[in-house]
Image (tube, grey):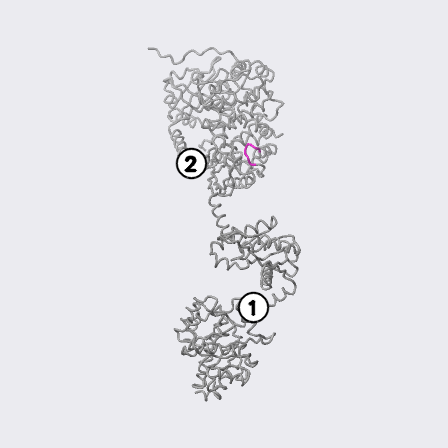
Amino acid sequence: MTVTPFPDLSPVAAPSFDVEKILASIDTMAAQRPVAAQLVSVANSEDTSAKELSRILASDVALASRVMKLANSAYFGMRGRVTSLQFAVTVVGFTTVRTMATVALTDLDDESRLPEDFWDFTTHLALAAATLAPRFGQRPQDALCLGLLAQLGAALLFHNDSEGYAEIAATEPTFAGRRAAETRRYGINSLRLTAVALEQWGFPDPMTVPLKHVDDYRAADGALLRSCFELAARLTTEDYETVPIVRVSCGQLREEDVVPVLDVVRADAEELRRAMLGD
Amino acid sequence: MTAVTASDDHVPPEIVSSIFYSAAVSDSLALLVAETSGRTQRFTWANEGAVQLLGYGPADLCAMPVEQLFPTLGGGELKLLLRRERSARRTLQVRTASGALLDAGILTTPSPGGRRWTVMLRATANEQERALRATADAHERRFSALTERSPVPTLLSEQGMRLAHVNDAFCSLVGRGAEEMLGTGWISTLHADDLDAVIEQVSAALGGGEVEVQARLIRDDGTVRTTVIRFAHLFTPGVGAGFVATIEDITDRLAFEARLAHQANHDPLTELPNRTLLAQYVAERFRPGAGGLACLFLDLDNFKVVNDSLGHTSGDELLIEVADRLRATVRPGDLVARFGGDEFVVVCEHVGEDDAVALAERIIAALARPMRLGGVDVRPHASVGVTVQTAEHVAPEELIRDCDIAMYQAKSGGKGRITVLDQQARAEARNKLRLVTELRDAIDSRDITLLYQPIFSTASRTPVAVEALARWDHPERGPISPAVFVPLAEESGLIGGLGLLVLDETCRQLAEWDRLTGVAAPPRANVNVSALQLDGNLPDQVAAALQRHQLHPSRISIEITESALMKDPASAQRVLQQLRDLGVELAIDDFGTGYSSLAYLRHLPVDCLKVDRSFVAELSAGHGEIASAVIALARSLNLCTVAEGVETAEQADELGRLGATYLQGFTLAEPMTGGHAAAWFAIHGETAQ
């Protein structure tokens, strides 16, 4: 018997775009937003305290005000009771602070540099993820953050290749088709690029693993995020051709489960968008 | 100098080789080196740890294309793993020699030049981490099992007010499903007026406190449950703060407490506010000098008649009907309270005297409608006292007191009347009130003194006894008549103290006379007892006084008015019998002025009748019929008699002729102090011995 340790690799067409440049550009951005960069690196540490995080956060006034705004948004139900930054950090949680720092670090808060309707889709995606998380045995807060950052890769691709990316978005109406087109053009799809970036910054596994399994309909790890993409598309995309939810959710959801979720998400999305962008 | 100086850039070769050796043979650290050759990257070196982790032979590893080891890596992603200028960190699946996929954390570090990388592998799901995760999962499962099955409604927050878990007990408390309440959904179960307080306490709990708040929860059927929510702080390292909350449903307890409070403040028979609530109500609305508050005090006329003749059940029915009629007659917002017994008080705000009187008239008219009680038509009548707040009222209780006084005036003026307490009446009432206070002080400081009036034997005209008479010499008002202060003491509950004082002082005086004058001392003293003293305590009090002063019971005669005996004849007879058993003598005072049944008199254990002074006075006018009849009656019952108020020698002679046993009067001997009496008896008493 012959063991072939190296099966032939299927030939891959050379991508027409150097994706490493994109990652390199993040490092450049980090240098321009040192406070955000620091928050991204410390927020996940086990010995981080709200006091320490809020101390760092206070030096970035714009970011701090967004955290305050988010803490007082309907999503957290605190109705304007959050008046100190430290308390705001406590309310939104460390992962959320870190997520917001990542948004600032990667210029996701500059809508002029993003694909069309980026935040509209993202907030619906994030809220759907948070709302449905308990059904999938996940922490809602992690799911919210994952939803907020899932499209980071797409934004990075758009930053560096706005015309090419816009063309993909325009010509590929389905998620699977779009991601295949991304892989063809960049050698990596946008969600995997998000995963690469988040892993690079040390975000925990629950934030990165689902990104890698979105396209595998059999993978339970990607079921929540996949379902939320479906719901966000139903809520934000005109003439969207729906996919049965039972299929994308690995059988975890039925259509009747979805209706109340859509209502909740629709109600909170705009406020979350304002908090994230500091409008 | 032989020492080698190592700079940051230049590490001595022997150290480099030492580190390389340890890295090469380490089995806990998986290290590989990848190099670019042509257009592909291949591994060119692997340490012992990598060989063990991956299962390939060293030779196989050292020719393997890098992407071969990472099958999930997409075509363009290799360059993101092997970056030319920066290290990269990924979590990827690694294909081992057996074909199994292993999750591993990968750290790549480029060498200068960008063509060679050190690749470090760390299996993420190693045994220790798996065990840790299993423990954490078990903890979480245990915690959720504990809360899920707990009968205590429990909430577990995720962030801020957002919930991650609610248990079945909470779901059934609010009658909703868990799904609806996760996140901020549960906020809609909080009563809108309590939401701010809850958020306040959640803030405190997130900040590290243990707090509680009372809040109402709205069930899905719209009913309200009042709860106490207790919050405790929860901190998850690396994540942030949350809370765990337990909910206690106190609705039933509060209802019970409210029922108790209602019972404490309401009359159970009529459901009207009681005296306590009335006092509170008036106190809350009373503003000194403001006016506008009016009180009506109602007392049913002849309620006792209904109670005694038709029974207590009918009496209760009457009170309930009166309460209903009062409620229906007063204006909305007026308070109707049951003050006690058959007394009711109505309090109105923003009214003048005319309005208050008009209301009183309406009430009297409403009450006077006939009602059927025990088969009899009864028309309840009431006497009403009205007071409207004036500048002179300085405390709320004065209002109630004044309308009480007005009611008594209405009653004494004839029943079924309305009396408004006017200025003069109020002044008199105040005066009386002050006098009561002064009387209480006088009794406490024994400023009430006793005078003793000798009583003579008709036959021998010698003194045989004295009657003790209470006197009050007021320091400012001068002497106050017993006809004033005795009824006052009776009305104001001071009669008990006054009676004891008289009894004790008389006994003390008797003992002193004995000591000073021996056999010349008055043989007996008569002590007056009020109707209100005539209860089961009296015999003990008399016995105690006698014992205290070491006197024989025969030294005392207790005088009780005829009307006092008639109030509750059965009880009076019992008390008299006990006194008689003690050995004291008993006399009926003012005999002939009441309405004693002679048959009843026969059964009373008395020794003596006192012929009232009014009958004695009639002797002078030639009308001796009554005095004569009383004396004859006494004699036929084998009782002795004392004729009071003997003013003239002719009266004395006539009484002697009629057969009176004893005489007492101003001309015979005036009342005198204890000291005088000792001297007087020393002179006049000897003939009596």
Our reading of the magenta stretch's main secondary structure is loop
In the depicted view, which residue is nearer to us: B82 or B428? Answer: B428
Q: What's the residue type where badge 1 is placed?
A: Thr
Q: Residues within 10 Å of mark 1 (few under 14, many from 20)?
A: few
Q: Is residue A114 left or right of residue B83?
A: right
Marking on residue B147: 2
Whether B391 is drawn above or below A216: the answer is: below
Distance of label 1 from label 2 (alpha carbons): 67 Å
| Residue identifier under label 1 | B437
Disc 1: which chain? B
The percent position of residue B674, horizontal first and vertical second, equals: 50, 81
Q: Is residue A69 left or right of residue B186?
A: right
Q: What's the residue type where badge 2 is placed?
A: Thr
Instruction: Give the foreground label among 1 and 2.
Output: 1
The percent position of residue B487, horizontal first and vertical second, equals: 54, 69
| Corner quadrant of residue B133 | top left
Q: Residues within 10 Å of mark 2 (few under 14, many from 20)?
A: many
Disc 2: which chain? B
Residue B33 belongs to the span the image colors magenta: no
Looking at the image, the residue that sits furthest to the left is: A1
Q: Kindly identify the residue that appears in the image at 56 percent across and 68 percent down.
A: B437
> Which element carries disc 1, helix, strand or loop?
helix
> Which element carries disc 2, helix, strand or loop?
helix
In the rendered image, is residue B264 in sight? no
The percent position of residue B526, horizontal first and vertical second, equals: 47, 77
**Start-end of magenta stretch:** A73-78
